[in-house]
Image (tube, rainbow, N blue to C red):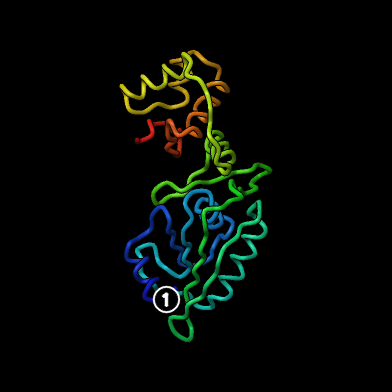
């Protein structure tokens, strides 16, 4: 990647596939962004770029890279593959570009307080993945045709989505009078079958019909 390309990405701002960090302060938090990118559509983490997209660079960029690579190894499981490039702005300052592909080993997660936490990218934010999102990431790696029959609960779901546009797990559970685990399993199965789509949210995911 050239400096000109970095400026172009920076001008477009943060988004689904791009995250800026001025410096590698709190690397245990920055790795959440890398996890989210790997679990979603891949993208770039740029160290040395301000939140407003100014490519200001960072002094001692090699030290920033060292801190980040140590955190990646320590905090991200399973091992995350990435490409690293350091571009110098001048003799003192540089920008580090971590290029992350959509991972075949997803979901990647962070061990935090003895809990595994996965993250996904939603627009320009990284949010914690729900149980359902985690399961979709895990099972969605293997592309295979899903065969199932429409029963009463599936018909209730599709009709509600046709009428209202979206539904949450809790709403579906109450509407179809199902235990939580069965409502969750049904939604995950229909997402994997490409019938509906999950839209991750900070508080509660919702589901919509898949666009034909």
The foreground one among 5 and 31 is: 5
- Quarter of the image holding residue 54? bottom left
Left or right: 111 in relation to 156: right
**Residue 188 location, x and y as percent?**
52, 30
- Quarter of the image holding residue 10? bottom left
Element on which disc 1 rests: loop
Label tally: 1
- Quarter of the image holding residue 31? bottom right
> Residue drawn at (43%, 62%), measured in percent from left and top?
20
> Residue drawn at (58%, 48%), measured in percent from left and top?
106
**Residue 45 location, x and y as percent?**
48, 62
> Residue drawn at (58%, 38%), measured in percent from left and top?
139
Residue position for label 1 = 2
The foreground one among 139 and 60 is: 139
Mark 1, other Cα within 10 Å: few <14 / some 14–19 / many ≥20: few
**Quarter of the picture holding the N terminus:** bottom left
**Residue 16 location, x and y as percent?**
41, 52
Image position of 75 with respect to 151: above or below: below
**Quarter of the picture holding the C terminus:** top left
**Residue 175 location, x and y as percent?**
43, 15
Image position of 76 with respect to 1: above or below: above
């Amino acid at each position: 990647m050239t400096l000109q390309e970095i400026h172009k990405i920076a001008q477009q701002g943060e988004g689904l596939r791009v995250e800026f960090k001025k410096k590698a302060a709190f690397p245990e938090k920055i790795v959440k962004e890398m996890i989210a990118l790997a679990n979603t559509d891949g993208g770039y983490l740029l160290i040395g770029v301000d939140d407003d997209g100014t490519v200001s660079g960072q002094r001692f960029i090699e030290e920033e890279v060292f801190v980040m690579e140590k955190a990646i190894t320590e905090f991200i499981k399973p091992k995350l593959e990435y490409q690293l490039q350091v571009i110098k702005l001048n003799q003192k300052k540089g920008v580090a570009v971590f290029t992350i592909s959509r991972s075949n080993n997803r979901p990647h997660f962070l061990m935090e307080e003895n809990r595994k936490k996965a993250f996904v990218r939603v627009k320009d934010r990284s949010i914690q993945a729900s149980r359902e999102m985690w399961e979709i990431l895990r099972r969605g790696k293997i592309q295979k045709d899903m065969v199932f029959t429409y029963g009463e609960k599936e018909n209730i779901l599709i009709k509600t989505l046709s009428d209202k546009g979206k539904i949450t797990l809790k709403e579906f559970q109450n509407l179809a009078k199902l235990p939580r685990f069965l409502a969750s399993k049904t939604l995950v199965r229909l997402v994997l079958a490409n019938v509906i789509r999950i839209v991750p949210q900070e508080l509660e995911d919702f589901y919509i019909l898949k666009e034909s």
